Image (cartoon, grey):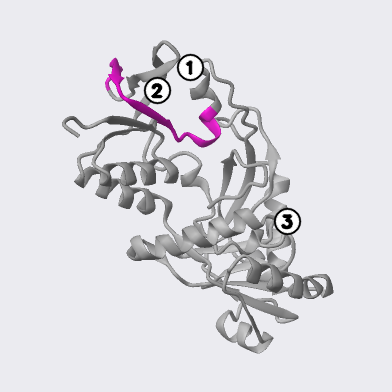
């Protein structure tokens, strides 16, 4: 091409930064626009979980296959940014244990490496697990730091010529007939408002996608769901610990640096920018989480975060 096509990516979360990385590698001129800090939206408030797809293997084959495929790609291109500690799906009661064969069969169908391990082995590698454990399955889950995750993609995007504009809010879209030809932005640091033209605009704003699309008179129905995650003051598990059953509130504990994060509840919200944290949801996370790791209740709650997502099953990948 004699002249590079210019693409604007709105949103510097995992989707936006990965898109910018890919487009810059392809030789396009890329501008990333983010109204706050990098990864300050949905991405910065997620589980930090690199999904194996195990959580969706029974309920959502398509989602599970997508998870394991993305998992394997990220292992190849971002190995230094991941903690590949694997995950355990644990059976706490007879209902969980009865679910195990179904879980293993569906993991096989979705090409998710899953293996049944003994209770003795599970307690050896995760000594804080409930000692009354009835069964365990190991899967290739992992953990990442959302901020570092996005910065890694932006680093290669910038190396290939991309421009990154944090603290710039899109206040409108430029239109050429029915086509979007750029954006109107406000720089929150200086108050300056100006326009940026483009050949293509990518809306990577997650729960705010409907708001941006409305500037082009396009109706994108989005019903955001919020969920509470609770971080305790000690890292009690080295592997991701999931309840061996259908996805439910408080059924996962993710290790992140020196903490363990319990999640998550789910409810619909009208405004993704203003989410209150119901205390009963925090209490529920502790109640359900301690069934897998009893010591969770004995450690101080360090932080309670509201997670917001535009997926109805609150899947975060």
Question: Is residue 78 in view?
Answer: no
Q: Residues within 10 Å of mark 3 (few under 14, many from 20)?
A: some
Q: Disc 3 designates what residue?
A: 248
Label 1 to label 3, Cα distance in Å? 36 Å
State which tag comes first along the sequence, 3 or 2: 2
Above-or-below relation of 173 to 43: above
Q: Which residues are magenta?
A: 190-209
Q: Residue at x 40, y 40 (%)?
A: 16
- Quarter of the N terminus within the rendering: top left
Question: Is residue 152 in view?
Answer: yes
Q: Quadrant of residue 64?
A: bottom right
Count of numbered circles in the view: 3
Q: Residue furthest left?
A: 2
In the rendered structure, are the residues bearing label 3 and label 2 in contact, judged by CB atoms less than 8 Å apart? Answer: no
SS class of the residue under badge 3?
Answer: loop
Q: Position of residue 71 (x, y in %)?
A: 48, 62
Above-or-below relation of 12 to 299: above
Inspect the magenta stretch and tell me whether residue 192 lies in it: yes
Q: Disc 1 designates what residue?
A: 215
State which tag comes first along the sequence, 2 or 1: 2
Q: Which mark is residue 170?
A: 2
In the rendered structure, are the residues bearing label 2 and label 1 in contact, judged by CB atoms less than 8 Å apart? Answer: yes
State which tag comes first along the sequence, 1 or 3: 1
Q: Residue at x 44, y 59 (%)?
A: 144
SS class of the residue under badge 2?
Answer: strand
SS class of the residue under badge 1?
Answer: loop
């Amino acid at each position: 091409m004699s002249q590079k096509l210019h693409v604007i990516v709105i949103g510097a979360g995992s989707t936006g930064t990965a898109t910018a990385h890919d487009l810059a590698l392809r030789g396009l001129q890329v501008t990333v626009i983010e109204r706050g800090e990098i990864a300050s939206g949905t991405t910065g408030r997620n589980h930090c979980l690199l999904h194996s797809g195990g959580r969706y293997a029974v309920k959502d084959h398509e989602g599970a296959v997508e998870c394991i495929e993305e998992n394997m790609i990220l292992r190849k291109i971002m190995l230094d940014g991941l903690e590949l500690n694997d995950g355990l799906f644990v059976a706490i009661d007879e209902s969980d244990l009865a679910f195990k064969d179904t879980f293993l069969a569906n993991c096989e169908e979705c090409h998710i490496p899953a293996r049944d391990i003994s209770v003795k082995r599970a307690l050896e590698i995760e000594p804080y697990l409930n000692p009354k454990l009835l069964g365990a399955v190991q899967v290739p889950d992992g953990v990442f730091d959302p901020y570092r995750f996005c910065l890694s993609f932006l680093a290669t995007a910038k190396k290939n010529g991309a421009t990154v504009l944090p603290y710039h809010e899109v206040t409108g879209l430029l239109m050429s007939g029915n086509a979007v030809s750029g954006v109107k932005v406000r720089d929150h640091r200086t108050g300056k408002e100006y326009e940026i033209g483009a050949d293509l605009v990518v809306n990577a704003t997650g729960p705010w996608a409907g708001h941006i699309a409305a500037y082009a008179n396009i109706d994108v129905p989005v019903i955001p769901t919020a969920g509470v995650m609770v971080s305790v003051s000690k890292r009690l598990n080295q592997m991701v610990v999931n309840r061996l059953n259908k996805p439910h509130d408080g059924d996962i504990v993710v290790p992140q640096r020196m903490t363990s994060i319990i999640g998550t509840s789910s409810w619909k919200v009208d405004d993704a920018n203003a989410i209150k944290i119901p205390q009963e949801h925090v209490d529920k996370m502790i109640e359900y989480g301690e069934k897998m790791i009893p010591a969770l209740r004995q450690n101080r709650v360090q932080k309670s975060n509201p997670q917001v997502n535009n997926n109805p099953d609150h899947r975060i990948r």
